[in-house]
Image (cartoon, rainbow, N blue to C red):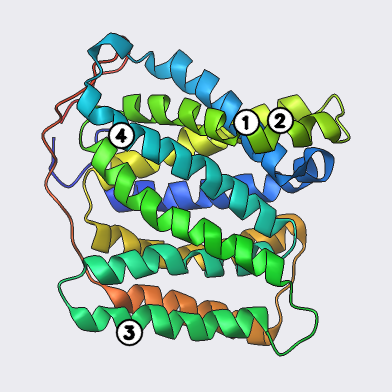
Amino acid sequence: MNSRRSVLGLPPWMMAIAAMLAVQLSNALSVPVIDQVGPAGTAWLRMCFGAVFLWLIARPAIRSLHRTELPALLALGVVTGFMTTFFLSAVERIPLGTAVAIEFLGPLTVAGIMSKRRRALVWPLFAFVGVLLLTEPWQASVDLVGVGFALAAGTCWGLYNLLTQHVGDRFSGISGLSLTIPVAALATLPVGLPQVLGGQFTWWVLPAAAGIALITPVIAFGLEMLALRRMTHTAFGTLLSIEPAFGTIIGLLVLAQTPSVLQIVGVAIVVAAGAAAQHGGRRDAPVTTDLPSSTTKETT
């Protein structure tokens, strides 16, 4: 197979873009569920259904798992669970596009740190200017709690990218993901279950959460993991620069969240900072020292 293409026959950049769109669509679709069972409850239900779907698809061979791989798997699971929880908590309070732009400071900072060019660290500061325009802190209406949740999600997002590439290098297909999402469900259970039990639970919440989980984490996170097997942190971080724009567009189309002119400028600045941070960076396919799966096999 052509080295420029992933195991699914698609270029890694195309898989990454599809993953970004899927993530933002699932976040927008989560808003009605958040109204019923809260952000933590919604995140927990998504992780639970995602774990079920991934186990049915990948069927990972647990007995073949090496103890040396456990720390990375556990860390990625915890980070994934709380990245989703914090972000949905932010979306409950601030517009989707604004939340994504603030959250993007996390992976952008990681891209700058991982770069061989120290001046790349200037770009997270440039992006921060765009975030200021988005949040308009000079307005009394700014929701600082929502901004704080978005920043917490961004910290998790930066760690998530690092850990996803590490785990993806060692497990074929989505077998690594099928192990980390159950960890995410367990990690968020203490905050998610109380919201579900104390919320306004209606019959459509479970099928809605299941459908959203199929989009994210199953499809979106699976595509990200496969894409990161062929891309450097720098290249992936650069490509992620368009995600704030995706968040703004999805927020407009699905949630009718119309940004102001100043906020559009802020999004443009964040996107420009991400795009300017790094260039290129495709990586060779890693050698998988892998957890076998009874139903999936990677071909390169």
The CA span between labels 2 and 3 is 41 Å
Is disc 1 in contact with disc 3, using a CB cutoff of under 8 Å?
A: no
Q: Position of residue 233 (x, y in %)?
A: 26, 58
Is disc 1 in contact with disc 2, using a CB cutoff of under 8 Å?
A: yes
Q: Could you say whether the residue bearing mark 2 is in a helix, strand or loop?
A: helix
Q: Mark 4 or mark 1: which comes first in sequence?
A: 4
Q: Mark 4 or mark 3: which comes first in sequence?
A: 4
Q: Mark 1 or mark 3: which comes first in sequence?
A: 3
- Identity, as a three-letter code, of the amino acid under mark 2: Leu
| Above-or-below relation of 18 to 241 | above
Q: Position of residue 27 (x, y in %)?
A: 63, 49
Is disc 2 in contact with disc 3, using a CB cutoff of under 8 Å?
A: no
| Left or right of residue 127: residue 115 | left
User: Looking at the image, is mark 2 or mark 3 nearer the viewer?
Assistant: 2
| Left or right of residue 73: residue 231 | left
Q: Could you say whether the residue bearing mark 4 is in a helix, strand or loop?
A: helix
Q: How many marks?
A: 4
- Residue at image point 30% right, 34% down: 71
The CA span between labels 4 and 1 is 20 Å
Q: Which residue is mark 2?
A: 193
- Residue at image point 37% right, 53% down: 159
Residue 164: mark: none
> In which quadrant of the rendered image does the C terminus lie?
top left
User: Looking at the image, is mark 4 or mark 3 nearer the viewer?
Assistant: 4
The CA span between labels 1 and 2 is 5 Å
The CA span between labels 1 and 3 is 38 Å
Q: Which residue is mark 1?
A: 189
| Above-or-below relation of 255 to 300 | below
The CA span between labels 4 and 3 is 32 Å
- Identity, as a three-letter code, of the amino acid under mark 1: Leu
Q: Which residue is mark 4?
A: 71
